[in-house]
Image (tube, rainbow, N blue to C red):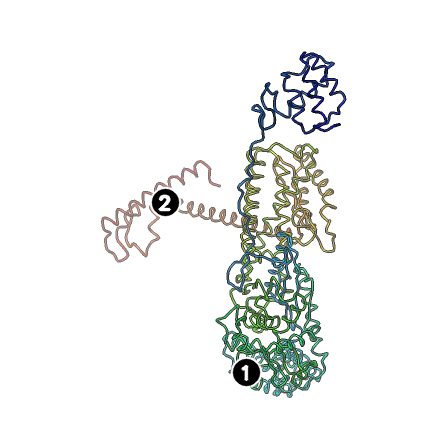
Amino acid sequence: MSGSSGEQAPAYRSILSISDEAARVQALNEHLSTRSYVRGYSLSQADVDAFRQLSAPPADTRLFHVARWFRHIEAILGGPCARGEPCGRQASKSRRGQPQWSPPAGSPPCKLRLYNSLTRNKDVFIPQHGKKVTWYCCGPTVYDASHMGHARSYISFDILRRVLRDYFGYDVFYCMNITDVDDKIIKRARQNYLFEEYREKQPRAAQLLEDVHTAQKLFSVKLQETTDPDKKHMLERIQHTVQLAAEPLERAVQNDLPAEVADSCAEVLLEEAKDLLSDWLDSTLGSEVTDNSIFSKLPKFWEEEFHKDMEALNVLPPDVLTRVSEYVPEIVNFVQKIVDNGYGYASNGSVYFDTVKFASSERHSYGKLVPEAVGDQKALQEGEGDLSISADRLSEKRSPNDFALWKASKPGEPSWPCPWGKGRPGWHIECSAMAGTLLGASMDIHGGGFDLRFPHHDNELAQSEAYFENDCWVRYFLHTGHLTIAGCKMSKSLKNFITIKDALKKHSARQLRLAFLMHSWKDTLDYSSNTMESALQYEKFMNEFFLNVKDLLRAPVDISGRFEKWEDEESELNKSFYDKKAAVHEALCDNVDTRTVLEEMRALVSQCNLYMATRKAARRRPNRALLESIALYLTRMLKIFGAIEEESSLGFPVRGPGTSPDLESTVMPYLQVLSEFREGVRKIAREQKVPEVLQLSDALRDDILPELGVRLEDHEGLPTVVKLGDREALLREREEKRRVEEEKRKKKEEASRIKQEQEAAKLAKMKIPPSEMFLSESDKYSKFDENGLPTHDVDGKELSKGQAKKVKKLYEAQEKRHKEYLQMVQNGSLK
């Protein structure tokens, strides 16, 4: 607006001094014509005073400047001001103002809590640096095939990692190690090498028997020293198997049987006695193995197999993978600093951690995870390794609870140069050095199996906090539960394990993952037929829902037809949908409780199925937009859990051997056309009464298409539903359906046969005249009257009144039956 409020005041005073109202308004209009009108202009008191004496805008259209400003001021002030009344926003009585706004009370946000082994409680998860999460996971010791115990840990951590990343939105930096230097690896590598050398020499039958007998003596000592009942049972089983395998070869040698017979028996014995011979060979020749490549070849092979297994299980690869053999310099430096800080000491070329010195420090504590296990020598020695618990090694320690940071290498072991002489890393120090190098003085999460808590993880904590001189190397320690096989403990050392490859031959990666999702990640999981059957049924239940929704979405509809009016059923289902989503969120916040999540998802699908069935019964199509939203949500959750491997927009992807992930969208239009054509043909066949065509149509549905992974579902009065699924699953369904139908047929035939036999027996009984019915019962009666009624029992004693009454009653009943029979004969109703 041109001119300030101060500049306008004199002009207004001059105008207001005019006594004639018409002249005053005319002057005001002329004055206002020289000013610019700006919407939103902030009024001055001079502007307000100029219009105070006007009660309404002028009617003369030539005075439009005054009329415009009057309306402008009136809108701002809420109405005209009476003469002499102060004007302004606060003074206007008729003005409407906005009421005071209050934010909703809301509800407190659900916070993620994780079961922390450091507190044995569910603690609120608070990363140290905003949304970034640093996570270290103990990887496998690679000396044998990966088994379902490994799957238990790595699938569970994969689920947790995906949930933190894809559901809660954390930026997870995930590190994992490969232990490729370890007592188990060294011993297994030497044994394999020595056994293969022994086999290549092809020992004569007599020599092999002698060596096996020598090995059995050493094995017997080992068996006698074993106190663990499970391990003892395993060793006894091996011993018995070897004895049984040796007997045929002994007979072949004693009886001087042909060489090919002896060679065949020897091959069997070699295979069965492999463990026993390997132990013996290692005890006698192990120290002579000096080629370091022997110790790297074994872990390299099994690491490769481990990665293949993880990929097959759809476990995400770590962001960083560390190998002990590649971090030896960092490990040496780590050990040196622990010694420099006063918590380690060298002894006879090895370096040990001083647990007494560490525990006595005010700022440190030893045994944070399992304090009650401190001093458990059996557990401590298992942690040190089979090659490191000899009497001379144990005597090097200041305290029995001390553990090796660095081990002086003995003959037959790999070694690296260091300040204390040639040696190799201890087991516990490996993770500390590698994790410390990558994640620093404090990480958010450390994970591992339940059995690693003590001594491995407690020793990791101690040596790492001794290195960094802190008390918070790990903020949250997560431990996955044990895995049992049909209720029995699983252990690689007990040779009681199922490899991942073998498990995947029986069940898919998704089915195994669903089985794990149906149990808490921190509790024991029993891998059994019942567990897997539950997973299979859950997968089938969810897949049927997805297939039904896909069929609904394929039905042609115009754009506006996609949005239908919601009735009470849709509102109720939508409310349930949001309730279930809230319940899922609460369950995930509660220590990532996937078991509850899957149950909530199952309940939601059950409600959807009921809704669809109700609509189907009423011949009304369900609301596609609502069901699509629910199906997409369920798909997203299953993707987050890793249960949907490929990129699938909705539901489980359909893939055959060597097919592309887009198989469904490629073939479904053709299947839809086929289904519609078949439906048209069936209609004509019914009208024209051509049963052969209907039979061919049924054969297409029941026999031909399932072989291609296609299922057709015919519904009376509704379009045929087309479902593309897994071929093997459909064939199993077909066989099960045929088996059930065959059982029904057999039961029906059996029932018919029994009925016929009963009718034949009844008819045969009806044929007998009442006068003859008792004559054949000579084992009961000896005399009869003229009507054939018994009078005396088998001993010649006259029947009592009660007995006579009973037989008379039976006689009369037979008399009635026989008359019915004679009537049937007379009528010709008998076939």
The kind of residue tagged 2 is Pro
Using the image as rendered, state which of residue 60 and residue 591 is in the foreground. 60
Provide the secondary structure element on which disc 2 rests.
loop
Q: How far apart are marks 2 and 1 (CA)?
A: 107 Å
Say few, some or many: other residues with alpha carbon within 10 Å of mark 2 (under 14 / 14 to 19 / 20 or more).
some
* Residue at image coords 60%, 62%: 445
In the rendered image, which residue does mark 2 sit on? 769
The kind of residue tagged 1 is Arg
Instruction: Measuring from the top left, give residue 66's x and y in whole percent.
Output: 70, 18
Above-or-below relation of 6 to 160: above
Instruction: Measuring from the top left, give residue 735's x and y in whole percent.
Output: 61, 52
**Which label's residue is closer to the chain start, 2 or 1?**
1
Q: Can residue 139 be seen in this view?
A: yes
Q: Can residue 248 be seen in this view?
A: no
In the rendered image, which residue does mark 1 sit on? 398
Above-or-below relation of 772 to 717: below
